[in-house]
Amino acid sequence: QVQLVESGGGLVQAGGSLRLSCVASRSASSIINTMGWYRQTPGKERERVAVVSRTGALNYADSVKGRFTISRDNAKNTVYLQMDSLKAEDTAVYYCGGTTWAGLIYWGQGTQVTVSS
């Protein structure tokens, strides 16, 4: 069974930084290709923030380029999201997502990030 557990959310002032972590269960390591971060605010669809493939290919949403950095440690089944220069509009529930080689997406429980202006 694939499980993803996020940590690191919280409250921060605009301009500050937070680091999110997501650990995948050991059983997930062989079936998950891409891991990444997504976010959602009330009334809006979940949007992709940043993803990284098993081989290290990166993709960022335009809104976070230059401010957020995604990284991955395959040995630890962990993906990180370093968020700098945070803005009020970054406030959302952030979800870790793991996409299998077959295209199935598994989700973590989500962690709240609140940026005060």
Image: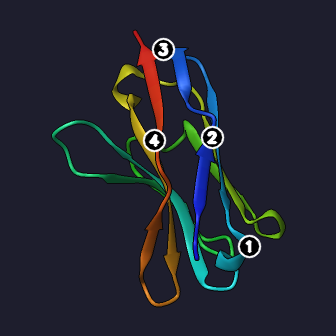
Is residue 78 at least partly visible in the picture? Answer: yes
Residue 46 placement, left or right of 50:
left
Q: Are marks 2 and 1 in contact (CB under 8 Å)?
A: no
Query: Along the polypeptide, which appears first: circle 3 or circle 1?
Result: 3
The numbered disc on residue 64 is: 4
For the view shown, which residue lies furthest in the bottom direction? Answer: 102
Residue 10 placement, left or right of 43:
right
| Mark 3 surroundings within 10 Å by alpha-carbon count, few (fewer than 14), some (14 through 19), many (20 or more) | some
Between the C-alphas of marks 3 and 2, the distance is: 20 Å
**Image vertical order of residue 93 relative to residue 100, above or below:** above
Q: Which residue is mark 3?
A: 14
Circle 1: element type: helix
Residue flagged by tag 1: what amino acid is it?
A: Arg
Q: Residue at x 38, y 28 (%)?
A: 91
Circle 4: element type: loop
Between the C-alphas of marks 3 and 4, the distance is: 14 Å
Q: Nearer the viewer, mark 3 or mark 4?
A: 3
Q: Which residue is mark 1?
A: 26
Between the C-alphas of marks 4 and 1, the distance is: 30 Å
* Image quadrant occupied by the N terminus: bottom right
Residue flagged by tag 2: what amino acid is it?
A: Ser
Front-most of residues 70 and 4: 4
Residue 55 placement (x, y as % from top left): 69, 77
Front-most of residues 1 and 42: 1
Q: Residue at x 53, y 60 (%)?
A: 36
For the view shown, which residue lies furthest in the front direction? Answer: 1
Residue flagged by tag 3: what amino acid is it?
A: Ala
Q: Residue at x 34, y 27 (%)?
A: 89
